[in-house]
Image: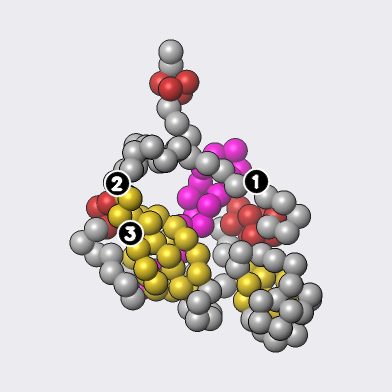
Amino acid sequence: MSDDATKSHKPVPAPDDLSRPFWDAARAHRLAVQRCAACGYYNHPPRNFCDACLGRELAFTPLSGRGAIYTFTVMHQRDVAGFEADAPFINIVVELAEQPLLLMVANLPIGERDRVRVGAPVEVWFEERGDGVVVPQFRIV
């Protein structure tokens, strides 16, 4: 059996009509989330209505890509499909600079363990997973 046949691959997104603009922006190396035209509130993940005012005029808007670690955990499990070879690694929740509690999930290599802390500043980067799949990730700055 070849290495490719036994190697596990990281999961890839399955965009739908609602999330496709997020993934299209990521493919272009831009971070964009929904923003409500009525009240200016950012929604992530994408929804059919604004979490703040229930407005339905939502458009994807570019973000700065800056934020801070809101919380984190070290993942030691080696049975998470596609991430077996990465364990242990650090799962992070990032609070984006544009709005309190505008959160995204990403991961860091275990080599960042000494630097990771709640409040650590981060910036977006884009992980190429092949076949046109690009996933926003964050790194400590």
Labelled pair 2, 1 in contact (Cβ < 8 Å): no
Extreme residue in the top direction? 1
Residue at image mark 1: 14
Q: Is residue 73 on the magenta stretch? A: no
Q: What range of the chain is rendered magenta? A: 121-137
Query: Where in the figure is residue 20, as x and y percent of width and height?
Result: 70, 55
Q: Amino acid at mark 3?
A: Thr
At x 45%, y 37%, the residue is 81
Q: Is residue 109 visible?
A: no
Residue 76: mark in rendering: 2
Number of residue marks: 3
Q: For the point 72% across and 51% down, which residue is it? A: 16
Horizontal and vertical percent for residue 18? 73, 59
Q: Which residue is mark 3?
A: 73
Give the structural element (helix, strand or loop) at label 1: loop
Given this view, does label 2 or label 1 mark the residue nearer the observer? 2
Q: Label 3: how many residues lie within 10 Å, few (<14), some (14-19) or many (20+)? A: few
| Separation of residues labelled 2 and 1 (CA atoms) | 26 Å
Q: Position of residue 119 (x, y in %)?
A: 33, 75
**Drawn side of residue 19 relative to residue 129, left or right:** right
Residue type at mark 2: give it.
His
Residue type beneath disc 1: Ala
| Label 3 vs label 1, nearer the camera | 3
Quarter of the image where one finds residue 43: bottom right
